[in-house]
Image: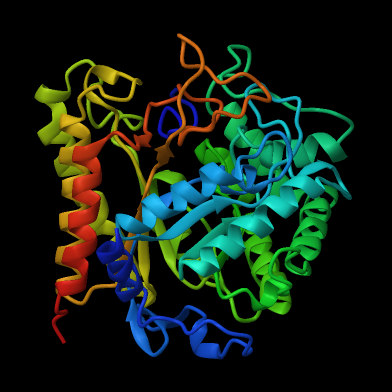
Amino acid sequence: MSQVSRRTLMGTGMGALGLALAGCAVAKGDAKASSSDFVTVDGIHFKLKGETYRYVGANIWYGAYLGSAASFGDRTRLIKELDDLKALGVMNLRVLASSELSPLINSLDPAFSNKPGDYNADLLTGLDFLLAELDKRDMKAVLYLTNFWEWSGGMVTYQYWTNGGQYINMNDPAHPWPEFADFSAQFYASGAAKQAYYDYIKMLLGRTNSISGKAYRDETAIMAWQLSNEPRPGGSDAAIKKNTDDYYGWIKDSAALIRSLAPNHLVSLGHEGLQGANGQEEIVIKAHEHIDYLTAHIWPQNWSWVDKDDLPGSFDAGAAKVQAYIDAHIAIAQKINKPLVFEEFGFPRDDIAYEPGTPTTYKDKFYGLIYKAVEDAIAHNTPVAGSNFWAWGGAGRALHKDYHMLRGETAYVGDPPHEPQGWYSVFNTDTSTQSLIRTHATDLLNIKSAS
């Protein structure tokens, strides 16, 4: 997300609820998973175990990092975070499954890939552990395979590895917006960069889980593989026009590769929606031609739909734009006859505070707006299937007074390292926000869709 996107601006009873949200409970045992144990698409709906699958979800990009047994991991914390999320009724997690060691400022270290063909065994085992723990809880994962933005290395790093070492940093005054986005989008035309990306996909999807012994292709905890986090065809209109054919080709080829390796899993693009295509609906539609479902991301502060210095005075006007954005994507999903997930949405704490315990009045109002829109859409039998809030910070806490995460630090919160730690996180002490999530999960069970 940037000047027009986030990436440039700066109990037992609930356990039963979670199982119901995902469909009927799965009997554990050694039997091979049947096709009904995987999430599938039937027109505008997801299906799981013969039932319509709808969900309350969260983003927890650092799940595989916590799952590692190495010094940067914390399996005890991960288990507690998963238990806390399930107790809220959250049954679907969107997780980073690839990162690229990079010279880019504020990018992750360690990373899944040190360079092409050199992969971090500790992080891969961390992903194994996460998937095994999700399976125990009948939770599902959406795993994204690279990033358009800088914080996990991403497409710019694939180019850096293969173009002789050229790159630019996000927010570099010498390269103002939209230069970074235009540079990142050159990935789609780079055969060498794409090959390194495809090699990573072949390695990962061909993997056998070291914890469960399951081949990744047979992991029922995986709902979908996502091509990238927020892949745009460019930032400027000129770059978008130049790149669209290569962009569509990358999507088609990547989707075909994933389906050949993991035919039981869905393929997702990870797209922001209209905001990631400079408002061009035809790009959003064409980009999803070979993709199983539509996604949309919603960032009112980053897109200047609300004024961070006057949330009380600007919230209602921003809320109207949010509702219009939701409605526009429901209409697109209806046109292409595919499910729709609002898989990223976030809002700051009052007074743009970052500290746990500070008020969340307008954050809660925003979550309430999203959840009501989802419930209304489901009640009217639209393609909306669920949402994933950004992001679960849980027990994570910023380590520094400036709320900046230094390279290699492991006090993971929901906000990636290029953003203030706590900006969009839901902490384990945010009781009012958690109450909204829990209530939404309960309400989702009781909705009777119009036929």
Would you identify the image quadrant in which residue 104 lies? top right
Question: Residue 93's spot in the image, x, y percent?
Answer: 46, 56
For the point 54% across and 51% down, which residue is it? 95
For the point 30% across and 18% down, which residue is it? 353
Quadrant of image for the C terminus = bottom left
Please, is residue 429 above or below residue 89 in the view?
above
Question: Residue 149's spot in the image, x, y percent?
Answer: 59, 37
> Which residue is more in the foreground, 225 or 322?
225
Coloring applied to the structure: rainbow
Question: Residue 249's spot in the image, x, y percent?
Answer: 67, 63
Residue 210 vs residue 426: left or right? right
Would you identify the image quadrant in which residue 374 lies? bottom left
Residue 323 visible in the snapshot: yes
Number of numbered discs visible in the structure rendering: 0
Please, is residue 69 above or below residue 29 in the view?
above
Residue 272 visible in the snapshot: no
> Which residue is more in the foreground, 158 or 183?
158
Outermost residue, top side: 401
For the point 77% across and 69% down, which residue is it? 208
> Which residue is more in the foreground, 129 or 265?
129
For the point 13% across and 82% down, which residue is it? 450
Residue 124 vs residue 387: left or right? right
Would you identify the image quadrant in which residue 19 lies? bottom left
